Amino acid sequence: MPNPDPKAARRATLLAAARDVFVTRGYHDAKVDDIVAAANVAKGTFYLYFDDKRSVFAELVDQVVEQLTGAIVHVDVGGDIEAQIRANIRGVVRVMRRDPLLTRILLSYAPGLDPAFEKHLRGFYDGLKRLLEESLAEGQGLGIVAPGDARLYASFTVGGLKEVLLDTTATDGDGATVDLPRLEDAVFRLLEGLFLRVDSRPQAETLIVAPLPVMAD
Amino acid sequence: MPNPDPKAARRATLLAAARDVFVTRGYHDAKVDDIVAAANVAKGTFYLYFDDKRSVFAELVDQVVEQLTGAIVHVDVGGDIEAQIRANIRGVVRVMRRDPLLTRILLSYAPGLDPAFEKHLRGFYDGLKRLLEESLAEGQGLGIVAPGDARLYASFTVGGLKEVLLDTTATDGDGATVDLPRLEDAVFRLLEGLFLRVDSRPQAETLIVAPLPVMAD
Amino acid sequence: MPNPDPKAARRATLLAAARDVFVTRGYHDAKVDDIVAAANVAKGTFYLYFDDKRSVFAELVDQVVEQLTGAIVHVDVGGDIEAQIRANIRGVVRVMRRDPLLTRILLSYAPGLDPAFEKHLRGFYDGLKRLLEESLAEGQGLGIVAPGDARLYASFTVGGLKEVLLDTTATDGDGATVDLPRLEDAVFRLLEGLFLRVDSRPQAETLIVAPLPVMAD
Amino acid sequence: MPNPDPKAARRATLLAAARDVFVTRGYHDAKVDDIVAAANVAKGTFYLYFDDKRSVFAELVDQVVEQLTGAIVHVDVGGDIEAQIRANIRGVVRVMRRDPLLTRILLSYAPGLDPAFEKHLRGFYDGLKRLLEESLAEGQGLGIVAPGDARLYASFTVGGLKEVLLDTTATDGDGATVDLPRLEDAVFRLLEGLFLRVDSRPQAETLIVAPLPVMAD
DNA sequence: GATGAATGAGCGTTCATTCAT
DNA sequence: CATGAATGAACGCTCATTCAT
């Protein structure tokens, strides 16, 4: 037996090729011809494994989304909160390390630049923010998160993390990545400053960030 | 004389039309046909005022970049630091309010999704981060910014702000926006928690965020 | 003024080119490239005047359908019946003479060979048969049409005419056509034998064609 | 021995599958994939039994052509003419009943829609018409066929029959068919009116349909 | 023989850009 | 200057056919 599963291998080859091309060229500039050339297969072969160009992209994105979703666990306030938060950070960074190119695609999501994927990706980020927002609200009830607009905290945090992670990912995709424990530590301290009050001691000068209403002009 | 400068007016009309179309459709889905239709001019006219589709987009982006750049002043550590920082925040938010559509384009920038504009927009954000980084470093020397990796602070801050401002911009572009003073206040408090120590009192438990080296695998 | 309406002229050129190509190559073998080559325009020009390949074909078909529909008048039993029937035959043959290529497309309709146009063309033939059927039924009431299944008469007549007209149209499309009055006469005599009893005299040995029920197996 | 001839069985399965697919989808919309799926064999197997897609279609058509050819016998003017003509009609209708799907393919032939099969099918119809024409000419010599253009009679008859038979075939192919004796009778009476003078009595008012010359414009 | 993965020529359609009027 | 008809390169996708296993 030459290969355990040649079909899966082909699929993986195409997926990897697509990932490379999407990352270096962007979705629109990535031609199916580029992908099949990178995968060293004929054009038709591409359509044997994927419905169309868009669906490969979607699959790539979903892949990271799932990995990231799996890496994040809900914080149990009964346990060691700092440890759990650190574990979440570590999980996210690990996924990123494992496939920086793929992660880069996800991090590069931007509403407006491409309405085609807006819905797809927005769902992930919205879910992420909601999860974080709820955790923060819960934490606020317990006094371990600074009072203020939890949604605002969540949004700022997600945005800040995206930017930082994007910055620590090399553009050229040759695998340069960051020192894992250090990054984990840095991010934790950032969040600590932002809203965490995990030392449990009630603080005299807590930040109060008022809820931010959206108003019509 | 009907108009002081009919040519400039045409240009402005086209620019505004392009802005609308780019925001609602995204760059790639925005067709030159859409733009000229929105501007009520013939297709050829478009090329009388712009080299190509890309250059209109670039010009629009540059427009916001310039406005934002103009709205941000270097913080003079001799003066009222909080006031100056608040002024900067206010300036940025004001630009955003004045032309939410245009700002949205800028905020929606994402490296990787479209390499075509990567260079163009990256320059702006890099400049912004460098400016912030330098200010923070200076502030750290004066004890009014928490110690730690200034670049990381800058990156996180820029990313967080992008996300928050994007969230507070209505997708439909019909002008729903946020309460200005409240937003200014909220953002200031966020930054305060993150790294600002503007009350000048040396703090016992300062955050120490170690510099974050980028390493090869 | 060089041309009265250059746009209409272009359209007509393309339509004529499409007609030629469709007739000689058939719908599927007719490539848009063939059409634009025949019309001496660029490929994109084609799409300036038509939505897609199918719609040109549909327009061509509709063109003949309308001409034929216009050429056929309902027989007024109060007037000279033979003259009116002959006028109808003459009208149909004239349309065919005027544009044999176009007519050939219509005559070449066949259900099953191409479901895409089945609906479009079937409508015409169904209408034609229904019109004929009703006229025949009316004629039967007046004793000027032989008794029998009017629907069967109509179907047979339409099929027979199609075949005859197709036979008298040269395949190569170089315009060979038939002698008009002779054809009119021949077809009239055919119909006369089939079901017409225009001499009004009640006939002893009328044809009796029983209604033809469609049954399940 | 499971089957007397497993290879022939495979062939037959494929042929039947192709027939179904061609009838329901039409030649161009019928994909080889559809056929092999309907036949439950692998794609490659198709090419083990047939040269290409076209040749299956040709073979299917030839199949009906042969059946029909076999069902039609030359009319012996020494015998009972009406009986022989009726027998021919009955034979044709029987073939049609036995395989309505296949027949439908043949009846649906239309020159011009698809030149690919023009040659193939035209041969059959031309042969049919010639046979009929010769029989009619012979009958005219014997006074049992009305005088007139025998070719025109033949063409009209073939076309009329095609249309009638097509009409009496359900589109969905689920086998709805017509009452055999009734159809035979109806068709016979149609032909009787058209040109048959089988009652042998010399008729005072014979139809005279002049030969129809094809002329150049 | 049977399989079904692989192939690649080919086609319809789009759209940024040009240029004669 | 303005127009908008014309252009044609480019791309995503299809599907009949081949061939290694």
Image (spheres, coloured by chain):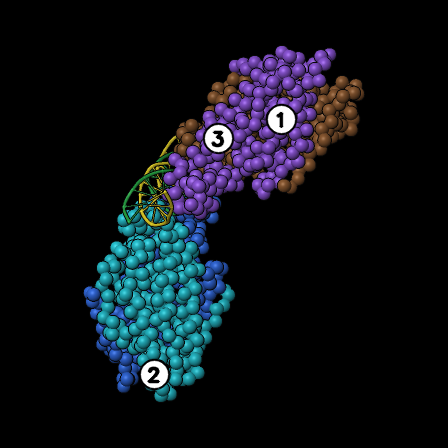
Chain colours: A brown, B purple, C cyan, D blue, E green, F yellow
Q: Which mark is residue B87?
A: 1
**Labels 3, 1: front one:** 1
In the picture, residue D156 is in which quadrant? bottom left
Disc 3 from disc 1: Cα separation? 22 Å
Check the residue under mark 1 and report the chain it is in: B
Q: Quadrant of the N terminus of chain C?
A: bottom left
Q: Nearer the viewer, residue A79 or D131?
A: A79
Q: Which residue is mark 2?
A: C80
Q: Nearer the viewer, residue C150 or D43?
A: C150
Percent of width and height locating residue B29: 47, 40
* Residue F5, above or below A29: below
**Labels 1, 2: front one:** 1
Disc 1 from disc 2: Cα separation? 97 Å
Percent of width and height locating residue A149: 71, 31
Residue found 39% across the figure and 51% down from its top: C52
Side of A69 relative to B64 (left or right)? right
Dot 1 amino acid type: Ala
* Residue B92, above or below D104: above
- The outermost residue toward the left is D216
Residue found 31% across the figure and 58% down from its top: D111
Whether the residues at callouts 3 and 1 have beta carbons within 8 Å, the answer is no
In the picture, residue C8 is in which quadrant? bottom left
Q: Secondary structure at mark 3?
A: helix
Side of D64 relative to A105 (left or right)? left
Side of B33 relative to C39 (left or right)? right
- On whether disc 3 and disc 1 are found on a single subunit, the reply is yes
Dot 3 amino acid type: Asp
**Labels 3, 2: front one:** 3
Percent of width and height locating residue C94: 29, 69
* Residue C79, above or below A32: below
Dot 2 amino acid type: Asp
